[in-house]
Image (cartoon, helix red, strand yellow):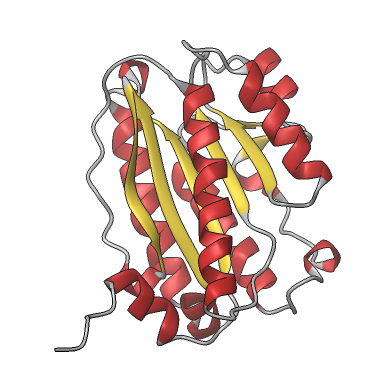
Amino acid sequence: MAEQMPFGDVELASNPEPRCPCVLLLDVSGSMAGQAMVQLNAGLETYQTELLSDPLASQRVEVSIVTFGGKVETVVPFTTPDRLVIPHIAAEGETPLGQAILQGIEAIADRKRQYKRFGLHYYRPWIFLITDGAPTDDWLPAATKVHDGEAAKAFAFFAVGVEGADFNVLKQLSKREPLKLKGLSFRELFVWLSQSQKQVSRSRPGQEDQVPLPNPTGWANL
């Protein structure tokens, strides 16, 4: 009997489109309990709906969700929006932000290796961090990895701070200026993210820097 191909490999082999991978690093520590978590969960559902509305983006964008709250966990491995099952995320624990970033960077590196194995082109990956607090672990190694990765154009790192976030840390982590969420405008944030990825997915891999992203004023305090 022939050996069955793993599901993740089937997904890559059956879709020859170039990929636009994005890791969502989501702070689900105890301070996110209540309305913040309700709105974050709703925002994720909006994100999926928006991506599915675009036939090209739904084939090219790949999403992985990594949560950090007490522990770091990959709750959704890389998948296209049509196969994405949005988990219900609960808030608990501390904020191991540094470990989460390192796990996200490793996930990107591993996914690139898989793309190359299947001969797939890909856009520069995104790592998209959302947090409302200060790290409770050693985040300096992660900051070094982020800056090295950005310099090598291995990925693009974005940081969004919810009310209560330590922006001093976020500014040291991110090459780009961190953005502050307006209240609990998670839905607007995820609409912006999906629109940005739709625009990137319409370009050619390697030309991402020429793609103008939508203005984030609808959800961020600039």
Which one is in front, 152 or 181? 152
Q: Position of residue 26 (x, y in %)?
A: 43, 36
Q: Kindly indicate the quadrant of the structure image that contains residue 14.
A: bottom left
Which one is in front, 6 or 34? 6
- Is the C terminus in the top left, top right, bottom left or bottom right quadrant? top right
Lateral position of residue 99 relative to residue 150, left or right: left
Q: Residue at x 57, y 32 (%)?
A: 182
Q: Residue at x 59, y 42 (%)?
A: 219
| Position above or below: 102 against 22 | above
Q: Residue at x 73, y 22 (%)?
A: 171
Lateral position of residue 85 relative to residue 100, left or right: left
Q: Position of residue 79 (x, y in %)?
A: 39, 65
- Is the N terminus in the top left, top right, bottom left or bottom right quadrant? bottom left
| Position above or below: 90 against 120 | above
Q: Kindly indicate the quadrant of the structure image that contains residue 148.
A: top right
Q: How many marks?
A: 0
Which one is in front, 60 or 50? 60
Is residue 188 visible to us here?
A: no
Q: Position of residue 195 (x, y in %)?
A: 60, 64
| Position above or below: 156 against 68 | below
Q: Residue at x 54, y 47 (%)?
A: 189
Q: Kindly indicate the quadrant of the structure image that contains residue 144.
A: top right
Furthest residue toward left: 1
Which one is in front, 129 or 194? 129
Is residue 138 visible to us here?
A: yes
Lateral position of residue 179 relative to residue 3, left or right: right
Q: Position of residue 63 (x, y in %)?
A: 45, 59
